[in-house]
Amino acid sequence: MGIVTPIESVTEKKTYVIKRIEPKKQPLYSFLKRFFDFVLSSLAVAVLLIPMHIVGLVIKIDSPGPAIFRQERLGKNGKPFILYKFRTMTIDAEKDGPQWAEENDSRCTKVGNFLRKTRIDELPQLVNVIKGDMSLVGPRPERRHFYEEFEEYINGFHHRLVVKPGITGLAQITGGYNLLPEEKIIYDMQYIEKMSFKLDAYCILMTLVVVFTHEGAR
């Protein structure tokens, strides 16, 4: 059986079964991953502190509302935490309920569109990494609402919670926001299965490529 097995449900809607994969026990890798997460994120925050304050000021000038967007996401083993991002949408963006961002999303502000294309909106998550809620590399964190929604047709979507979520990951550098959840989970589980320094370095390097090409941004 592969990581993802499609089946036809009684309603003729395609559903998926996700094979659970336990990450390999790598004590040295786990220790050094956390060490480099903390050190690199701390250095990045120190270097980018003034530019990040300028970005925050521009956001507040561009549209009403706070510069930093806070939202609950699920971390390792389903533990909730507050994720930080630069606000890229109007403050009433989810007045009709939780929604995934769409390409050329009308809810985005002018500055927000630029921040999303360049991925600058993700920079405050460096604080989440320093706190230990996230890693630099891992499956992107999602809200409980979407886990419940996706589980209705992707049986085992929650298996991606066995590791810390990341600012970037294999799914992001492969297809970005354009991937459907049933496609995204394949790359998330492949990352969990093959976690290593080499794969982490590859993800970070390719993320820089994505930042400069704007591929997959939404």
Image (cartoon, helix red, strand yellow):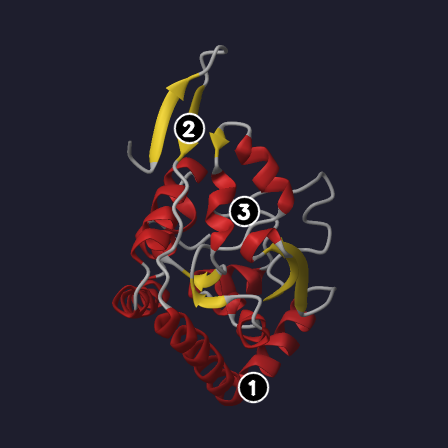
Comes first in the chain, label 2 or label 3: 2
Residue nearest the observer in this picture, 79 or 202? 79
The residue carrying mark 1 is: 49
Q: Image height check: is 121 above or below 155?
A: below
Report whether 66 appears left or right of 76.
right
**Quick one: label 2, few (<14), some, or many (20+) residues within 10 Å?**
many
**Quick one: label 3, few (<14), some, or many (20+) residues within 10 Å?**
some
Q: Position of residue 165 (x, y in %)?
A: 49, 59
**Quick one: label 1, few (<14), some, or many (20+) residues within 10 Å?**
few
Q: Marks 1/3: CA distance?
A: 27 Å
Comes first in the chain, label 1 or label 2: 2
Q: Answer whether labels 1 and 2 touch (C-beta < 8 Å).
A: no
Q: Position of residue 212 (x, y in %)?
A: 33, 68
Q: Position of residue 113 (x, y in %)?
A: 52, 59
The residue carrying mark 2 is: 16
Which residue type carries mark 1?
Leu
Q: Image height check: is 188 above or below 20?
A: below
The residue carrying mark 3 is: 101
Which residue type carries mark 3?
Ala
Q: Marks 1/2: CA distance?
A: 43 Å
